[in-house]
Amino acid sequence: IQTDDGSGGTFAKAFTIAVADDIAPAAPTSFSANATGSDVALSWINPASDFASVTIRRSSASYPATIADGTLVAQGVTSTSDSDNGLADGAYYYSIFALDGSGNVSVAANATVTVDTIAPTLAIGSPSVSTTASGPVDYTITYTGADSISLSAGDITLNQTGSANGTVGVSGTGTSTRTVTISSITGSGTLGISIAAGTASDISGNSAAASGPGTTFVVNTAPTIASDNATK
């Protein structure tokens, strides 16, 4: 700054004015969390200006409200993705905060995800009868934890002994049970079923394991007795 003393003289002085930055940056946008097994992939879009880095916090109870709440997942990140790996099954709540060069913190953007590594299970019930000559015989297949069931006749192995044989069919809808029916039964011996893996899945993509062999039933087809009408 320069001044005039009124006598033709001047005085000059240089100084610096410090302007405090107390304006928070905008929050990140499009924040998402996606689970694959026990790992969570996080992605977002950083603010276009007044941005230095992001900090991500996690909680299993509710969204962290401040940059000090919950468990620290990442800080000082300037990219647009990160990961949170090796988590136990359960629901997780994430908050992401943007910081500027002065340390001002944005409001949080939130994302939630459920980690689910438990596959659906299935159980093969007992046959509807223990002995038959021709059938049909039903098995009830009970699923637990399934969001979809794709069981078809091609997934079922007919376990046979002796000359016993039959035709396999599947009926039912919903996400809890199916009925496997063995019909057109012939021969003698035993029959039972086993079910291949992958006949049900949950919303997290976990698939059911194989099951069986189930309990067998006896096939006892009565022999045909020829009548002898010969004249003695």
Image: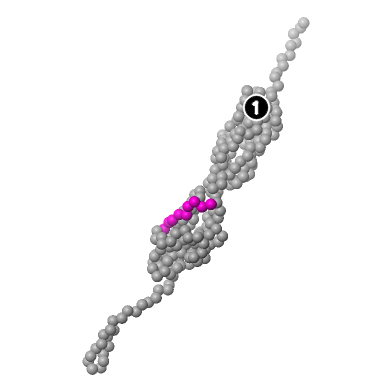
Residue 188 on the magenta span: no
* Residue extending furthest toward the bottom: 7
Is residue 190 found left or right of 26 in the rendered image? Answer: right
The type of colouring in the image is: one colour
Picture coordinates of residue 69 (x, y %)? 51, 64
Element under label 1?
strand
Residue 232, x across and y down, in percent:
77, 5
Q: Position of residue 125 (x, y in %)?
A: 66, 37
Q: Residue furthest top?
A: 232
The quadrant in which residue 212 appears is top right
Quadrant of the image for the N terminus?
A: bottom left
Q: In which image quadrant can residue 77 be found?
A: bottom left
Mark 1 surroundings within 10 Å by alpha-carbon count, few (fewer than 14), some (14 through 19), many (20 or more): many
Which residue has dot 1 on it? Answer: 190
Can residue 152 be seen in the rendering of this structure?
no
Residue drawn at x 52%, y 65% is 65
Q: Looking at the image, is 73 positioned above or below residue 164?
A: below
Could one spot residue 16 in this view of the protein?
yes
Q: Is residue 81 magenta?
A: yes
Query: Residue 2's spot in the image, x, y percent?
Result: 27, 85
Segment colored magenta: 80-88
Tell me the residue at 67%/35% (across/down). Answer: 126
In the rendered image of this protein, does residue 179 appear above or below residue 19?
above
| Of the pair 187 and 189, the residue shown nearer to us | 189
What's the amino acid at mark 1? Thr
Residue sitting at x 25%, y 87%: 11
In the image, what residue occupies the spot 28% across and 81% down? Answer: 14
